[in-house]
Image (cartoon, rainbow, N blue to C red):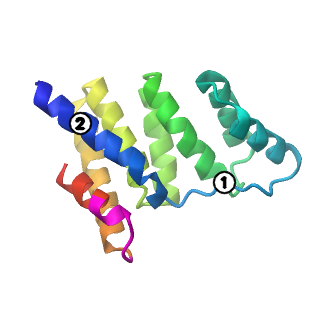
Amino acid sequence: MEVPVRKTIFAFLVCVVAASAAKRHFSTSAEGASGLILQQISQEPDGPRRLGYLEMFVERFPQHESFTWALGEAQPIYLAAKDFEKVIRAADVLLQADPADIYAAQNALKAAETKGDRALIHTWAGRAARSARLVRLAPPSEAIDYARQCEVY
């Protein structure tokens, strides 16, 4: 059982490197309440406090151009906190915005694996593979090798 766990951890770490493949955008020009919250997020190193600001931003500004960025930033914090339902809900939203967001899909797959839910594992393995295929079909980028690895995984 130790070898599959190592493969899972490796695949997950590779996903972290490929975050740049996702179409998430952090706007530094935001003004008003959204800008203040984004500033707090960017200055907050602490996971739980940062998560609070991220959740506040996502809840208050779902139409903002940095919405998917904020949700994508929250997803690994949810994963670390073992809040698997939030990881999966975030992945659903992120994949609606960008079906090629292999980072979001891989986080949801990791949550399903850690949860031990075979049906969820099957679902998210398929969704991660589809996202990886979309990345591979896109114009050449740094994420293609990663996409191949995710698809094989």
Q: Is residue 104 left or right of residue 134?
A: right
Which amino acid, by three-letter code, is at mark 2? Thr
Give the image location of residue 148, x and y in percent.
Answer: 23, 60
Q: Is residue 73 left or right of residue 80?
A: right
Residue in view at x 66 percent, y 54 percent = 26
Q: Which residues are magenta?
A: 139-145
**Element carrying mark 2:** helix
Q: Is residue 123 left or right of residue 7?
A: right
- The reply to whether the magenta stretch includes residue 71 is no
Q: Nearer the viewer, residue 15 or 114?
A: 15
Circle 1 is placed at which residue position?
A: 26
- The reply to whether the magenta stretch includes residue 140 is yes
Circle 2 is placed at which residue position?
A: 8
Please identify the quarter of the rendering in which residue 119 is found. Answer: top left
Residue in view at x 29 percent, y 26 percent = 114
**Element carrying mark 1:** loop
Q: Residue furthest bottom?
A: 139
If the image is split into quadrants, where does the N terminus sit? top left
First in sequence, mark 1 or 2: give its number. 2
Q: Is residue 56 left or right of residue 137?
A: right
Residue 147 higher or lower than 7, as above or below = below
